[in-house]
Amino acid sequence: MEYQPTDSTDLLIVGASFSGLTLAYSVHNPGLRSLIVERKRRLWSPSTGLITPPTLKLLEQVFPFGIPIIRAFTSMKVIFKDVGEVLLSSREPFLFLLDKDSFFSAAEEHLPSSFTLALGCSFVKTENKTAKVQTHYTETTIRYDLLVGADGALSKVAKSSGLPLVKEWLYGYEWKISRPAEDDFITFVVDPTVSRAYGIWMFPVNGGVRIGLASKKPLRKIDVQSIMKQYFSFDGPLLDYKGGAIPISGPVRAPFKEDVILLGDAAGLCGPFLGDGIQTAVKSGIAAARAVEQPNVGPSYVELLKKTEVTKYLKQQALLRSIWDRFVSKNTLKRLYKFTLRNQDHLLDDLTTIKEDPSSFLQIARKFFG
Ligand SMILES: Cc1cc2nc3c(=O)[nH]c(=O)nc-3n(C[C@H](O)[C@H](O)[C@H](O)COP(=O)(O)OP(=O)(O)OC[C@H]3O[C@@H](n4cnc5c(N)ncnc54)[C@H](O)[C@@H]3O)c2cc1C
């Protein structure tokens, strides 16, 4: 849809990805005038789109169209650098690959009529409940009652409003390589020299494989080809590059002020250890939608978010990351390898449940360290 200039709105959402769209689909107040501005010309997300079964269910609850899935995975090979590898399996699929292109086209097509979507329109800054936004040709100011920063890890909304910023992130990159896929599972490489805790992932897609890595260094400083040659028995030009920041400092201290709230990655709601942020982005969008119907939006949002246990889960991951960052060594990798072997039969199921029940996270950590 072409950008329609407007000079005031009740709700101004910046960013139309998982968190911003969830908010739009979850607000049930047709009287609320709402505008979503998205700087890209089409809806898109840098994420791989790997989601757990509970995340799929959640998406099905929020969006009134079939959630398109490319494939389901029941196995994962984990390679521990210079130590060994383990093939894990689950009885039911433990991960689904979302068809993001179809998902975002459907989300655009079915957007509730009370929401206007302005594509190719960037938020620039805010002052006194007025936001400056710009398209390629024009610059407009929009007055709002509530501003929502759903604009990712490097949130301009947070910066411009004086809200806390995500302090640390990894650079996440992904490519497609055209080659026949031999394996049917996801491969995951734990290589602390690429990035602590998670490193490289690879899985088959139609007509090729997708390879991604999360690195502490920006792309120009890493030799991707040689890293990949080290682990995979194939080579080839890297096509279809995309990338983005993965927040790893955990939830920001206060994701709100009087007339501004932050969702998803902008609020640091992405897994500092696993890099999983779709489910938490969606949960933050749902919490924000409920909060919008209440008098003190910001505090209500934080309370509602707490009830989902999202912040608890991510704080645990942040703790695990800081422990890992200090103590990772060949010995830790050996222990993790042995731990993975011992728990081979149920580790994938455990990893799925910790999202829903953060207390099981501590149990898994105890099993590892105990
Ligand atoms: C390479 C990579 C792979 C990943 N893989 C997975 C995965 O498999 N599973 C998983 O759960 N998570 C994954 N993640 C994390 C996941 O992508 C995020 O946690 C999730 O997308 C957060 O959603 P969000 O809506 O908060 O923010 P984003 O998806 O980052 O969306 C922010 C939106 O705001 C827009 N925007 C930004 N600035 C402005 C502005 N100034 N004006 C207007 N619009 C703006 C952007 O264009 C974007 O559309 C991955 C991340 C990366 C980088």
Image (cartoon, rainbow, N blue to C red):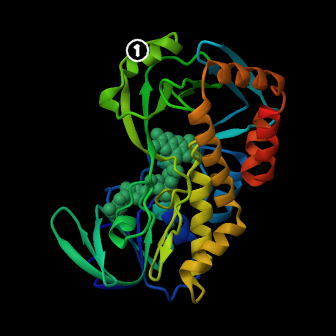
Q: Is residue 55 above or below residue 224?
A: below
Name the quarter where the N terminus is drawn: bottom left
- Mark 1 Cα within 10 Å, few/some/many (few <14, many 20+)? few
Q: Quadrant of residue 29?
A: bottom right
| Residue 48 position within the rendered picture, expressed as x and y whole percent measured from the top left | 51, 40
- Amino acid type assigned to the residue bearing label 1 in the image: Ser
* Outermost residue, top side: 233
Residue 341 percent location from the top left of the image: 79, 21
* Vertical order, 171 against 299 (above or below): above
Q: Position of residue 365 (x, y in %)?
A: 76, 39
Q: Nearer the viewer, residue 313 or 114?
A: 313
Residue 189 image-quadrant placement: top right
Residue located at (32% from left, 60% from top) = 39
Q: Nearer the viewer, residue 196 or 370?
A: 370
Along the horizontal axis of the image, is 127 left or right of 167? Answer: left
Q: Residue at x 49, y 56 (%)?
A: 265
Residue, disc 1: 226
Q: Residue at x 73, y 31 (%)?
A: 74
Could you say which is closer to the camera, residue 205 or residue 51? 51
Residue 3 seen in render: no
